[in-house]
Amino acid sequence: MAEQITNYQCPACTGPLHFNGASGRLECEYCGNSYSTEEMEALYAEKEEQASKAFEKEEEQRQEQEENFWDTSSVNDDWGSDEENMRAYQCPSCGAELICDASTAAGSCPYCGNPTIVPGQFAGTLKPDYIIPFKLEKKAAVEALKNHYRGKFLLPKDFSAVNHIEEIKGVYVPFWLFNARAWGHVTYKATRSVTHREGEYRVTDTSHFLVQREGRAEFQRIPADASRQMPDDYMDSIEPFDYNDIREFSTVYMPGYLANKYDVSIEECAPRADIRCENSLEGLLRRDVQGYETVAETGRDIRMQRGEVKYALLPVWVLNTRWKDKNYLFMMNGQTGKLAGDLPVSKAKYSILRLCLIGGLTLLFGLIGVGGALASLII
């Protein structure tokens, strides 16, 4: 049975609406009208209630009238192990029944193109607390990728010209936001050196110090992405997000973008938040250790008080490019524009750079050797 889904249509022409992060309004690509999020929330609250009642009534009538005219005993409706990961939805615009991954919460109909929202994916404990709306549009993501190519000496010459973008998707990525307090102390081994001459020799006196620092810190909204589809290192690289733009969750910000619900639990993400808290506190204490030439941590005792956890959807542009039959993945923060991704390396340029470095080091050591010999002659 297909589940109910919702899409946002223009009240004037019924065309699909798209949330524009720059204006903060829902805009119609056909007639040009735009609407505030408050207007659409009020309009669709009533429509969703009516649609839900009509959907339930239709299902009741279908079940009452359903009859089997053909022998369907050989038809297999057992999806096996895949069943729990699949969902069926019916597009309210064209009536098409869609099958997608169980974690999909927003997207678009491949037949009529209307943006669709799956309210059931956000029901109960799955409903996000917050959302940061997209601020940058698709053009900004493409431009950021072009800028990412510039100034990369080891990048193959034809990569930026020949490779092309296969797909660009604006995705609301699920994140757990952790609140916590951390306190403790860290021990460091530090050194400070003084050099002086004694006759023909240069003598260096090195003093060793045991340094201890103690402190506490409070952390708000430490992010940890809760989607297995998103690489953790990419998500960490495009941080931070500006929480000044955070909003109470509403589906009104989602038309025109994809969205997934979380499929990584709080318990699985919690160790990442713990490590970030510990390392952040150590970093704060380390910055207070000054006036030494070398500093090395020798021990730490950091404890934490874990606090509240919230569920949020944060904006990310996902760009897939292809070059020489290989795919390259890039991700951009849909709010700040920070971009991360791997680039290919030109073997020829790498070899040239390596030879230059070896040649430069050889010349440097040669000059040092000549300088030492001259100093010996002078002495």
Image (cartoon, rainbow, N blue to C red):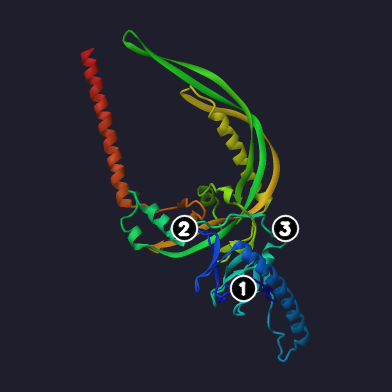
Q: Earlier in the sequence, mark 3 or mark 2?
A: 3
Q: Residue at x 55, y 59 (%)?
A: 24
Q: Residue 244, relative to residue 214: is it above or below?
A: below
Q: Residues within 10 Å of mark 1 (few under 14, many from 20)?
A: few
Tell me which amino acid carries mark 3. Thr
Q: Which residue is mark 1?
A: 99
- From the image, which quarter does the N terminus lie in? bottom right
Q: Residue at x 60, y 66 (%)?
A: 106
Residue 329: numbered disc: 2
Q: Residues within 10 Å of mark 3 (few under 14, many from 20)?
A: few
Q: Residue at x 64, y 73 (%)?
A: 89
Q: Which residue is mark 3?
A: 125
Q: Earlier in the sequence, mark 1 or mark 3?
A: 1
Q: Is residue 228 visible?
A: no
The answer to which of 210 and 304 lies nearer the viewer is 304
Q: Residues within 10 Å of mark 2 (few under 14, many from 20)?
A: some
Pinpoint residue 332: horizontal percent, then vertical percent. Answer: 48, 54
Pinpoint residue 76: horizontal percent, then vertical percent. Answer: 68, 79
Distance, label 1 to label 3, CA atoms, is 23 Å
> Which circle, 3 or 2, is nearer the viewer?
3
Pinpoint residue 305: horizontal percent, then vertical percent. Answer: 70, 38
Q: Under tag 1, what secondary structure?
A: strand
Q: Is residue 73 visible?
A: yes
Q: Residue at x 29, y 38 (%)?
A: 358
